[in-house]
Image: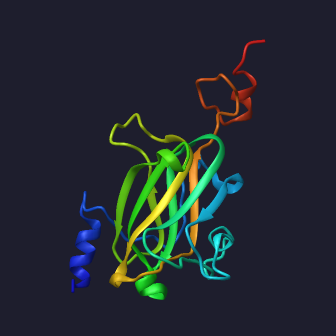
Amino acid sequence: MESDAEEAAAAGAPGAGRLKGSPELTVDADMREMAKTAAWSVSSCKAGNGVAALRDDNLDTYWQSDGAQPHLVSIQFQKKVQLQLVVLYVDFKLDESYTPSKISIRAGDGFHNLKEIKTVELAKPVGWVHISLSGADPLETFIHTFMLQIAILSNHLNGRDTHIRQIKIYGPRPNPVPAQPFHFTSREFMTYSTIR
C-alpha cells in the first residue's frame, strides 16, 4: 500500500497521468457546456441510479453501473461538435471500491467506429476531474465528433460496479460574429467589426 506522500508525489509528477480531482468546478470562460441537448445512454444501471443522476447537478446522487466491466456512458450529438474537455465528479471517500481508477475516452461517428483518444488513471480522486481532449500537437485543441463514449475500465480496490456523480462536457464558445476571424467580446468592437 502506498503512503500518502508517495501518492501525492505520483499524482503531482509531470507525465504521471494519475489525476486526483479538485473540489471546485473551474472552466475557462471561452468554453461552454455542450451535452445539454445530447442523447445520453449507459451500458447498465441500478434502479434509481441511471442517466438522470449524471446530469441533475446534484453531487449527492450518482450513476451506479450494474454488470460486467467495462462500464460505458455514451453521449450522442445531433450534429458534429467540437469538444475540448470532459469533467467528472467522483468521490473516493464516499464511494471507495465504486470509484473509477482507469477511464478511456473514445470518439467517433457512432458505435461502429469509436476510437480511443485518451486513457487516464485516477488516484483516489475526490472532486472534479478534468480530462483534456486536446492532442499532442498544440494546434489540436479540440476534437470534432458525433459521439463521445466514456469507458470505466477498472475501479479502485478491484470494485465491480462504479459510481460517477456528475459528467460535464465542454467545447469552445462559438464566435458571436459569423465569418469573423477575431473574437471580439465588447459591444463596441463588435459594432465596428464588419463593413457595411
Q: Nearer the viewer, residue 192 or 127?
A: 127
Q: Residue placed farthest to the right in the image?
A: 196
Relative to the observer, which residue lies in front, 63 or 170?
A: 63
Residue at figure coordinates x 48%, y 44% from the top left: 113
The front one of 157 and 130 is 157
Res. 169 image quadrant: bottom right
Residue at (25% x, 57% y) in the render: 15
Q: Is residue 33 visible?
A: no
Kindly identify the residue that appears in the image at 38 percent across and 43 percent down: 135
Q: Quadrant of the N terminus?
A: bottom left
Coordinates of residue 66 in the picture (x, y in percent): 53, 79
Q: Position of residue 74 (x, y in %)?
A: 56, 58
69 in relation to 117, above or below: below
Q: Is residue 153 visible?
A: yes
Snapshot colouring: rainbow
Labels in figure, total: 0
Residue 63's quadrant in the figure?
bottom right
Q: Quadrant of residue 44?
A: bottom right
Q: Residue 177 in the image: state x and y as whole percent.
A: 70, 28
What quarter of the picture does the C terminus occupy?
A: top right
Tell me what residue is drawn at x 64 percent, y 23 percent. Answer: 180
Q: State the image coordinates of residue 136 (x, y, percent, origin top left).
A: 33, 42
